[in-house]
Every structure is written in structure tokens, then in C-alpha cells.
Amino acid sequence: MTLERWRRLLPGLWAGGLLCVALLAAPSAFATLLPSDAGRMVACLFAQEAHTSLVIAVLLLLLQRAQARRGEAAQFGLEMALVLGTIACTVAGYFVVVPMMEAARFGQGTLGFGQWHALSMLLFAVKGLLVLALAWRAACRPEPLPTRPASS
């Protein structure tokens, strides 16, 4: 598979994964398990999602850089800005807000658990919108014309 195809495929797969986590897995856990068990399961799910998001974002950055080196894409375009935005949302949401949320659960910090949870959900939603925009742009990008060998 060519690099361009991977660059088109990954955002769609990523968006689908985020939608599955947000709309299917997390609500199902809270609908079927005890709240404490559901919370632990969803925390594990979001940990896996955060690490997966970082891996996919780095892959997309590398693909973007490879295309820029070949002169097929801008050094810093909208796609790169969208990917960097997703990285910022992931790092802030999972590696900053989640530890603060856990501290708030034990009465530490100035904000309560609910406030940190709302901020975490907001960052996840923004990341989801950025990934959907990436997937939309990847799907709408015109396909380059294939080059045909000259016939003799």
C-alpha cells in the first residue's frame, strides 16, 4: 500500500475507533456493570485509546513529512495542524487531566472530580472533531492521476 493510501486510511480508522469508544464501549460499560467496575474498565479503555491515538498521530506526522520531502505536500499544512491538535488534546486530556481527576477523587486540588471529568470529556470531543476533520479532508482529497508508461 502506498504512503498516500495510508495517509487516507488512518484518519478514517482513527475516527471510527474514537466513535466506538465514545458511543458504544463506554456507555455499554456503565449500562451493564456496577459503577466502580465500569469506571475501572473505562479508565483502562481510555488509557489504551490515548496511547493508540499518539501512535496513529505520530504515524500521520511521519507520512506528512515524507510527502513534504518528496514535494507532494506542504511542510506545514492544515493536516499537520490538525494532527498536532489531536496530540495536544491527547496529552492534555489523558496525561494531565486524568491524574488531576484521580487526585480530586481523594479530595486533593482546587477543582472537583466532576469538573475535571467535564474537561476530560471536552478534550476528547475536540480531539474527535479534529480527527473527523482529518478523515473528511483525506476522503475529499483528489486522487492523483496514475502515470502510464509510454507505449512504443
Image (cartoon, rainbow, N blue to C red):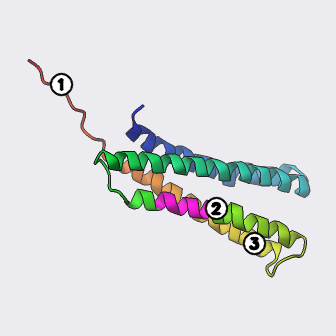
Q: Looking at the picture, how far across and down is residue 57, in whole percent?
A: 54, 51
Considering every residue shown, the one lying at the far bottom of the view is 110
Mark 2 touching mark 3, by CB under 8 A? no
Q: Looking at the picture, how far across and down is residue 16, in whole percent?
A: 58, 47
Which amino acid is tagged 2? Val
Q: Disc 3 marks which residue?
A: 116
Q: Is residue 23 left or right of residue 111?
A: left
Quadrant the C terminus occupies: top left
Magenta stretch, main secondary structure, is helix
**Pointer 3 local density, CA inside 10 Å: few below 14, some 14–19, many at least 20:** many
Q: Earlier in the sequence, mark 1 or mark 2?
A: 2
Q: Residue placed at 63% from the left, 66% from the top? A: 123
Q: Secondary structure at mark 1?
A: loop
- Rendered position, 111 above or below 51: below
* 65 or 127, nearer to the observer: 65
Q: Disc 1 marks which residue?
A: 149
Nearest-to-viewer mark from 1 and 2: 2
For marks 1 and 2, give the CA distance: 47 Å
Residue 146 visible in the snapshot: yes
Q: Which residues are magenta?
A: 82-91
Q: Looking at the picture, how far across and down is residue 71, in whole percent?
A: 28, 48
Which amino acid is tagged 1? Pro
In reply to whether residue 41 is colored magenta, the answer given is no
Considering every residue shown, the one lying at the far front of the view is 69
Q: Secondary structure at mark 3?
A: helix
Q: Earlier in the sequence, mark 1 or mark 3?
A: 3
